Amino acid sequence: EKSEAASSSLPRGGRRSEAGSTPVFSPPPPSVLVAAGSPGWLAPGSVRSGVPWDQQGTWNGLCVLQEVGARAQGGWWPGRGLQGLRGCRLLWPCPYSGLACILLRPYPQLQLLPSARQPRLPQWGHRQGHLSEGDWWEARSLSSGQTGYIPSNYVAPVDSIQAEEWYFGKIGRKDSERQLLSPGNPRGAFLIRESETTKGAYSLSIRDWDQARGDHVKHYKIRKLDTGGYYITTRAQFDSVQELVQHYLEVNDGLCHLLTAACTTVKPQTLGLAKDAWEISRSSIALERRLGTGCFGDVWLGTWNGSTKVAVKTLKPGTMSPKAFLAEAQIMKLLRHDKLVQLYAVVSEEPIYIVTEFLCHGSLLEFLKDREGWDLRLPQLVDMAAQVAEGMAYMERMNYIHRDLRAANILVGERLLCKIADFGLARLIEDDEYNPHQGTKFPIKWTAPEAALFGRFTIKSDVWSFGILLTELITKGRVPYPGMNKREVLEQVEHGYHMPCPTGCPASLYEVMEQTWRLDPEERPTFEYLQSFLEDYFTSTEPQYQPGDET
């Protein structure tokens, strides 16, 4: 009987040994997710005897299989239902009692090592943009035996909602709409996120279509029962969010559309190049293609360690003090947000290298001037402005000032993702030409009068610059104050002059621009307000959430 039970539980690709008493398996495909956990954590009846494989593909030890889920997807193996998850996962003894981790693609079979110090397991850091624990955890490959470090934002608890491909964690309503409406998502594509309005609850966001509105997103609140269950409508209650999702994958049951597929997502950015890779050697960077040239250096597409694609800003010698730059960079690397370009590493000896994540479309200014930019319509432009405002609202909360906010310092990635670059560098520049009074390189047309005249840079002077950036977006990259030189701009602005409303700019949007250009800095809006205003700019009069119960 035991032999028959083992045989019935063989995963796809399994075969029986010659003795016929012990199941023997081929190694799983790379997409099979491997977990580390104590055997006591397993549910009753989920343990099977087996012989683990060695590097040659034969099995030579004890393993346990936890059978979960009822249908195979992608590279997952089929198994019986357990805790609402799908597929089979391999479980290994772990030094932490009761802890289980699941390691996500592209990593193969890995096991956390004791030096990981039983950290609090993060949620999907690449979707949230934040991690409060160590960025890199030590791990051992179960296939090769090699040890190394993995980014901690690639792991999640094996039995939790965080391990599901449709769970996006703590992202906002607007960001969920942005991701679902991106190319590649069909009608019925969905994601689940933390509710912004109700602590402990979730929101289900679904891509839909109708003739009147075209593609759009609808939101449903997932409520929690006092007994621990979950529901959208009280007539259909479930023990877990995973079971709820499985139900609506099979029937729409009052939703706008049947759930069809998890929202697609881009590959996550790691938090740094590697563990302790901060000050790196120049020889570890290969410069491949010049992306642009500025007043103080060039920007290159490069490769670190022969494997990781990066952007490299090379500064001309004498641009800034290496000591001052390194001190500022230590602060800059602590600023982590989805809408800020991630600072990876530095070469602190002159010529200074600043190594950051690479965004495929380059600067917003050049993007707006290209064919793709000219095809952008007002909703897309306002959304890009909202993303910049979101990043600046984060800097506002962190009490950090940009000092040089303009379209040239915003980078554009896939799906019109916008990220703020070069924050904090302007104050370090020692070139005499970067002087507000006579310097030819100083961006007077973007600078608030109190900053240009008296050097009073604050987050409110960044708000002024953001208003100028809005005109760049609406005019597809036109230089501000056309027909006026820098001296004329400074004189006119000091006396209250504002640029006229750009062609095609709605009056309500121009009104916000004028608010950012008030002479008294304290009368200018906050970035928090600007983010909220721009995110809700095209919001219709429909309720925030779709009704879950019939009324």
Image: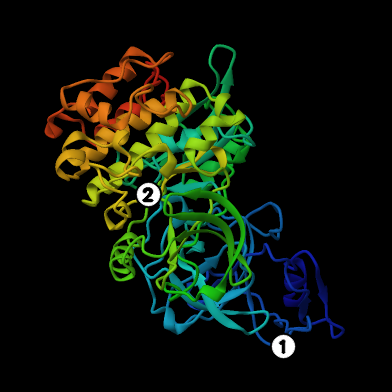
Residue at mark 2: 228
Q: Residues within 10 Å of mark 2 (few under 14, many from 20)?
A: few
Toward the viewer: 71 or 437?
Answer: 437
Disc number at residue 36?
A: none
- Residue 357 vertical position relative to residue 537 in the rendered view, above or below: below
Q: Residue at x 70, y 60 (%)?
A: 77
Q: Amino acid at mark 1?
A: Asn
Viewer-proximal residue among 4 and 140 = 140
The color scheme shown is: rainbow
> Which quadrant of the structure image shows residue 59?
bottom right
How many numbered dots are placed on residues in this image?
A: 2
Q: Quadrant of residue 471?
A: top left
- Examine the image and state in which quarter residue 66 appears: bottom right
Please report the residue visible at 25 percent of the width from the left and 35 percent of the height from the top: 463
Percent coordinates x, y for residue 413 in the rendering: 53, 44
Which numbered mark, 2 or 1, is in the foreground of this view? 1
Please provide percent x and percent y for residue 208: 56, 25
Classify 273 as above or below 181.
below
Asked if residue 453 lies left or right of residue 235, the reply is left
Q: Earlier along the polypeptide chain: callout 2 or callout 1?
A: 1
The structure residue drawn at horizontal position 40% and vertical position 20%, both measured from the top left corner, is 538
Identify the element where label 1 is drawn. Answer: loop
Separation of marks 2 and 1 at Cα, in angstroms: 42 Å
Tell me the amino acid under the disc marked 2.
Gly
Image location of residue 261, percent across then percent down = 62, 40
In the image, residue 546 sits, relative to residue 262, either above or below, namely above
Residue placed furthest toward the right: 18
Residue 287 spot, x, y in % from top left: 59, 63
Q: Which mark is residue 60?
A: 1
> Can you say which quadrant of the picture contains the N terminus?
bottom right
10 Å crowding of disc 1: few (<14), some (14-19), many (20+): few
